[in-house]
Image (spheres, rainbow, N blue to C red):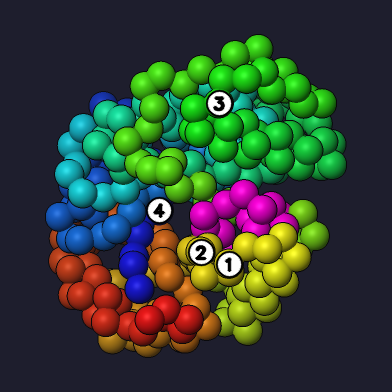
Amino acid sequence: MKLGLQQSNFTFGTGPDQIGPTFARIARDADQAGLASLWVMDHFFQISMIGPPENEMIEGYSALAYAAGITEQITLGTLVTGVTYRHPGLLVKTVTSLDVLSGGRAWLGIGAAWNEEEHRGLGVPYPSTSERFERLEETLRIAHQMWAGDESPFEGEHYQLERPLNSPQALTKPHPPILIGGTGEKKTLKLVAQYADACNIFDMGTDAVAQKYDVIRRHCDDVGRDYADIQKTILMQVDLVNESVDQVVEKLGAYAAIGTDHALFGMRNAHEPGSFDKVPDLVRQAEGLAVAGRS
């Protein structure tokens, strides 16, 4: 099993002048500890589950570009970009640029968007749920087309691209992996089967997550896709201050047993010196976990 870090909090108890150096230390520590991936939320206001909207929030792709310049191995993505935040052609160019400049380490993390407060606050249109999913599917189609080098016009209901040129192309082949976040069984998980390389499910317990995986499997059968081609990822919290490495590995093992390939976790104390001391051991033990369905 691979492990990744999600950094969702930029309120470090210091001034804005320390956000950059502190995030740099987190990114370097995550890279040097052997974590496979580093993720930031793509939000413009802090979300209510973590803190008030006034808390500091750094724009996601600026943060990832900064991290790319100070890390060497770790892959980089948003968990996840709301489809309403950026025109799809520009989003593909942004992720491509991150991939090129990082030496092939970019992900496209994407979802249907949900935080109406920040949309209204910054004047970003917030269409209906059904329209957001229509836009999500068109964006996924555009991403595949642009990364395939197909410059023919794209004519969708919501997006029209006269010449979807993407130069330079991404280093990652056939394209940066696409991760779709969300748990909706009729729309989100169907889009995973149709267009994505990975899904992301919240830590809702192994039984509930396994049920979501079963839904993806059925959708894969419907569209003629190999279920094994999709990386299964979960988002969870890890407390290495109050939990031992063995306790966390036991939890990870239960998810590996249902087929989870990649566990992405948040650490509330990631900004504190010494918070990554146990992570290399955690990475080593997680690598030894057998993922169900993988040889």
**Circle nearer the N terminus (3, 1):** 3
Name which residue lies at 84% across and 42% down.
Answer: 130
Contact between labelled residues 2 and 1, with CB atoms less than 8 Å apart = yes
Q: Is residue 235 left or right of residue 272?
A: right
On the image, numbered disc 1 is attached to which residue? Answer: 226
Question: Relative to 213, is 293 above or below?
Answer: below
Tag shown at residue 293:
none
On the image, numbered disc 3 is attached to which residue? Answer: 150
Distance from Cα at disc 2 to Cα at disc 3: 23 Å
Give the extent of the magenta segment. Answer: 188-201
Distance from Cα at disc 4 to Cα at disc 1: 28 Å
Among the 4 quarters of the image, the one containing residue 267:
bottom left
Q: Amino acid at mark 1?
A: Asp
Name which residue lies at 31% across and 48% down.
Answer: 75
Is 45 colored magenta in this rendering? no
Distance from Cα at disc 1 to Cα at disc 2: 6 Å
Name which residue lies at 65% across and 37% down.
Answer: 141
Q: Amino acid at mark 4?
A: Gln
Name which residue lies at 62% across and 20% down.
Answer: 152
On the image, numbered disc 2 is attached to which residue? Answer: 229
Contact between labelled residues 1 and 4, with CB atoms less than 8 Å apart = no
